[in-house]
Image (spheres, helix red, strand yellow):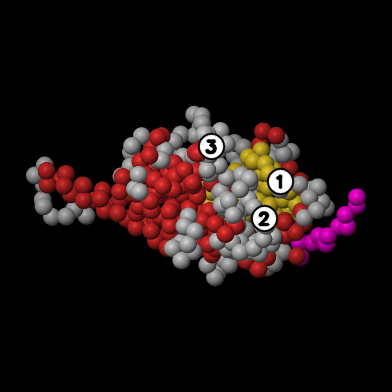
Amino acid sequence: MMVPAAPRSEDEILQPANLRSFTFTDLKKATRNFRPDSVLGEGCFGSVFKGWVDEASFAPASPRTGMPIAIKKLNQESFQIHKEWLDEANHLGRLTHPNLVKMLGYCLEDEQHLVVYEFMPQGSLDNHLFRRGSHFQPLSWDLRMKVALGAAKGLAFLHSDKANVIYGYFKTSDILLDSGYNAKLSDFGKPKEEEPTVGPSFYIDELPSYYAKRLSDLGWSTEDPTAEGDVYNFGVVLLEVLAGRRRLDRSRPSREQDLVEWARPHLSKRQISRILDARLGGQYSLADAQEAAALACKCLSGNLSVRPSMEQVVAALEQLQDTKETAVSDQGCRVVRKFGGSRQQQP
């Protein structure tokens, strides 16, 4: 069946967007003709390829001399392809924050729709938590809390009046890590007024991971995703960070397949050590783990008056980090006194 072509013009991109217009030829060269071994990820929208460009001119470059970039190439078969591309360029390209993946530019030529992003060398949090192999070493407690805080800051910014964005389907694969393990969110949602609607009988317990069994558990109405739903999903992600387990794992015994339901009793009874990732090797403060678990429990609460905002989540995670830094400082002072140093507090 022939589908009428939608209007296609770079003039549709809102200004100012601070985005670079790439030619399709240049992006082909940058990816060495979209070679299969340059694929970073694939999804229903299309594929993401790794490419290289000159850092100053953004002209195609070789892997040895160029700056890496990530190029999302949308599927040409999708009926919604132009709208998806336009939404991404207009709504995501205008947002700038340290905890959001930076969009660099786009390409629109004939039926080709591509978006260019900064490259995140450490990949997704999902890989570090759940994949095994020499390339993915277990994350330490400190790194996990650093990533959780960065992701929370990104979500809080999206919820702010400046961005006015509801994420909608937040999960660990949406959290990308740069070379310093700083978290940056990718594939975030559309402005609130453009969120899709769902019917009142819509159940999502069979969808992969990250979703409550009913929309009401997420804080959704029967029409629109909400900020409360994003907070719930962040709570699920935080629980995955603590436990090192997926939200839904059909390979486990039936009572352990749903991470939230399995872990919830241990969160409320301060039995957090029973669910913490064994790969942490006990290298964490039990008090900090209990605080993080209590925060996850609040985010997962079915009582929306208990569920915090993302700004409150950020404040709680920052307090947890400040407490750790203070403890390290105090420990240093005690060591000085033990060996006969001054009793004055060290800077």
Residue 308 on the magenta span: no
Mark 3 and mark 1 lie on one chain; the one further toward the N terminus is 1
Residue at figure coordinates x 69%, y 60% from the top left: 199
Residue at figure coordinates x 64%, y 52% from the top left: 203
Find disc 2 in the rendering and name its residue: 202
Q: Is residue 159 visible?
A: yes
Q: Position of residue 309 (x, y in %)?
A: 47, 64
Residue type for callout 2: Phe
Residue 2 on the magenta span: yes
The residue segment tinted magenta is: 1-11
Whole-angstrom CA distance, mark 1 to mark 2, is: 21 Å
Residue most extreme to the right: 1
Residue 108 appears in which quarter of the rendering?
Answer: bottom right
Find disc 1 in the rendering and name its residue: 44
Q: Is residue 57 visible?
A: no
12 or 168: nearer the viewer: 168
Q: Position of residue 286 (x, y in %)?
A: 31, 45
Residue type for callout 1: Cys
Instruction: Judge depth for marks 1 and 2 and give the one in front.
Output: 2
Mark 3 and mark 2 lie on one chain; the one further toward the N terminus is 2
3 or 123: nearer the viewer: 3
